[in-house]
Amino acid sequence: MALLGQASGGFTESSSALRLLHVGIRNTVGILTDDAFTQTNPPIITATNTISQSTGLDTSTLGVLSGSIAFSRGDVGSNYIGGPIAVGGAQFLLNPLGCFINTAVGNAYENTPGVASGKGPYVSGQGTYGNALYETEAQAAGGALVAGDDLTYTTGMALMSSLNGYLQPAQDAAGTTLVLTAMDIVSTGGSLGTVILGILKMPADSTQPEIVFDQRI
């Protein structure tokens, strides 16, 4: 179903995956890491059998994407934010902060304020959002799922970060918590896969190809 109300084609024709319905905080505290402009998409899990099958994903665009998750990046330095990092000793410094509003490198025929300023605005402090960038297939075994299995989105589900820094369910269809075994960040004290980013209010369907959620961070 579509959200109640009327709208022009503006948001469906937007170059941004994140749609601000009731915005929390537009947060600009933090400096984008260098790899926030150069990472490939998907950035971590790229093997063909577990590649990120994310709606709204443009694999030709480098850097962090609109709708992707902003992380603290203490591995780079004080007050840095960016996308996810692979397995390593600095994993415990990787924690989700919210969702990026814009794609860092900008879009064709638009100004590129992220490149000019080194800033990547993201939404924090709750709010309600539509997001066209989310996972459709599991990237790692967890619950009853194995890598490549379809993910099920059901109203009321908690949402967390996938290995590639995109939204995904925190449970499988049976309600079993998903564990990101391919990037065991829990063992290093970090919180990727344990922090609840939001609660799903409306799954995507053929009418509206985005998920709608209340953010929790």
Image (cartoon, rainbow, N blue to C red):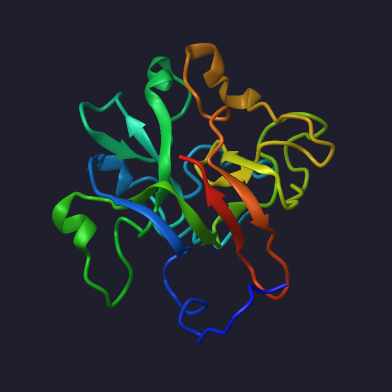
For residue 15, what is the image quadrant? bottom left
Report the side of 125 relative to 78 (left or right).
Answer: right
Seen at 75% across and 51% down, the residue is 154
Is residue 53 something that shows in the picture?
Answer: no
Seen at 40% across and 27% down, the residue is 94
127, 123: nearer the viewer: 127
Q: Quadrant of the N terminus?
A: bottom right
Image x and y of residue 3, in percent? 63, 72
Figure check: 4 above or below 164: below
Image x and y of residue 129, in percent? 51, 59
163, 131: nearer the viewer: 131
Furthest residue in direction left, as rendered: 116
Q: Quadrant of the C terminus?
A: top left
Report the side of 163 relative to 112 (left or right).
Answer: right
Image x and y of residue 162, in percent? 57, 39
Is residue 8 something that shows in the picture?
Answer: yes
Image x and y of residue 74, in percent? 29, 25
Report the side of 188 relative to 141 (left or right).
Answer: left
Q: How many marks?
A: 0
Figure check: 4 above or below 140: below
Report the side of 109 relative to 195 (left or right).
Answer: left
Figure check: 67 above or below 170: below
Furthest residue in direction bottom, as rendered: 8
